Image (spheres, rainbow, N blue to C red):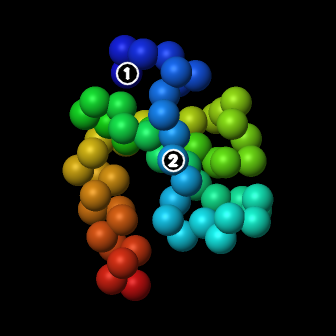
Amino acid sequence: MNRPLVLTQWRKSSYSNGTGGECVEVADLESLVGVRDSTRLGGPHIAVRRGTWTDFVSSLRGA
């Protein structure tokens, strides 16, 4: 992650209901995917390898 997370473009999960409740936000970070809680924008944040994130999302879709 070369750029500061404050300059990163975050987007809310498509599963968010838009009422301001808790949801996950993700960001493209070159070869990683950043993940944060939308109710705690200042952190903590995690970053996982893109393939790991893809596998995670795929497993949720299959549930």
Which residue is nearer to you in this view: 36 or 28? 28
The quadrant of the rendering that contains the C terminus is bottom left
Which residue is nearer to you in this view: 9 or 29? 9
Residue at mark 1: 1
Horizontal and vertical percent for residue 53?
33, 53
User: Which quadrant of the view contains residue 62?
Assistant: bottom left
Assess disc 1: are there few (<14), some (14-19) or many (≥20) residues with their C-alpha within 10 Å of its C-alpha.
few
- Residue situated furthest bottom in the rendering: 63
Q: Earlier in the sequence, mark 1 or mark 2?
A: 1
Q: Please give left or right for residue 15 compared with residue 49 in the image.
A: right
The three-letter code of the residue at mark 1 reads: Met
User: Which quadrant of the view contains residue 44?
Assistant: top right
Viewer can see residue 44: yes
Q: Where is 36 relative to 17, above or below? A: above
Residue at horizontal 25 percent and vertical 34 percent from the top: 31
Mark 1 and mark 2: Cα distance apart in space? 17 Å
Q: Where is 15 relative to 26, above or below? A: below
Q: Please give left or right for residue 25 compared with residue 49 in the image.
A: right
> Element type at marker 2?
strand
> Element type at marker 1?
loop
The quadrant of the rendering that contains the N terminus is top left
Horizontal and vertical percent for residue 49?
29, 41
Q: Please give left or right for residue 33 compared with residue 5 in the image.
A: left
Residue 55 — which label? Answer: none
Of the residues tagged 1 and 2, which is closer to the observer? Answer: 2
Residue at mark 2: 11
The three-letter code of the residue at mark 2 reads: Arg
Residue at horizontal 67 percent and vertical 48 percent from the top: 38
Horizontal and vertical percent for residue 9?
48, 34
Assess disc 2: are there few (<14), some (14-19) or many (≥20) residues with their C-alpha within 10 Å of its C-alpha.
some
User: Which quadrant of the view contains residue 6?
Assistant: top right
